[in-house]
Amino acid sequence: MKQQFYFHYKQFLILYFLCNLLFGVCLLASEKLNNAIEKLKLNVENYPDSPNTYDRLGEAYMQNGQTDLAIMNYNKSLELNPNNENATKMIDLLNVQLEKNNKDGDFRDILILSAVLFCVV
């Protein structure tokens, strides 16, 4: 009786994990990013040893423009599963994007400074 209970409880937990993950992915697909992020964060809290939960949360943060959080979650996914090629690709892509944004930001700062100096002179 006790073994049956644990067997069914494990099945329930697996289904719960899959439902949360799929629900989060569906929210991502429908571009309800804030809802997806909250659902996927809950999944990470409940299943902290699953690399897939961090991978999906990283994807949500990436789509929401939160690059630092995306990289952090992809790194955690990669830590849990060093063979995760998607996480490696996404980290590389996000780092390139960060470098580009930093260069663009420097250029914008120069333009603003130039405009201010032009107005003062």
Image: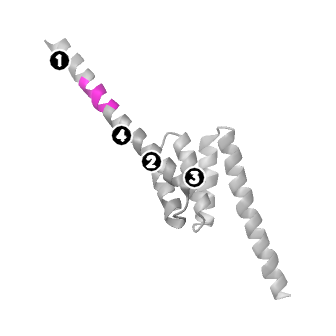
Closest to the observer: 88 or 46? 88
Quadrant the C terminus occupies: top left
Q: Main secondary structure of the magenta part?
A: helix
The nearer-to-camera label among 3 and 2 is 2
Disc number placed over residue 92 in the picture, else none: 2
In this view, which residue lies farthest toward the left?
Answer: 121
The residue identified by callout 1 is 117
Q: Amino acid at mark 1?
A: Leu
Quadrant the N terminus occupies: bottom right
The nearer-to-camera label among 1 and 2 is 2
Task: Quadrant for residue 2, please give it.
Answer: bottom right
Do callouts 4 and 3 mark residues in contact (Cβ within 8 Å)?
no
The nearer-to-camera label among 1 and 3 is 3
Q: Can residue 102 be seen here?
A: yes
Closest to the observer: 79 or 44? 79
Instruction: Choose the circle earlier in sequence order: 1 or 4.
Output: 4
16 to 66, vertically: above or below: below
The residue identified by callout 4 is 99
Disc number placed over residue 57 in the picture, else none: 3
Asked whether, in this view, residue 7 is left or right of residue 82, the answer is right
Q: Amino acid at mark 2?
A: Asp
At mark 3, the secondary structure is helix
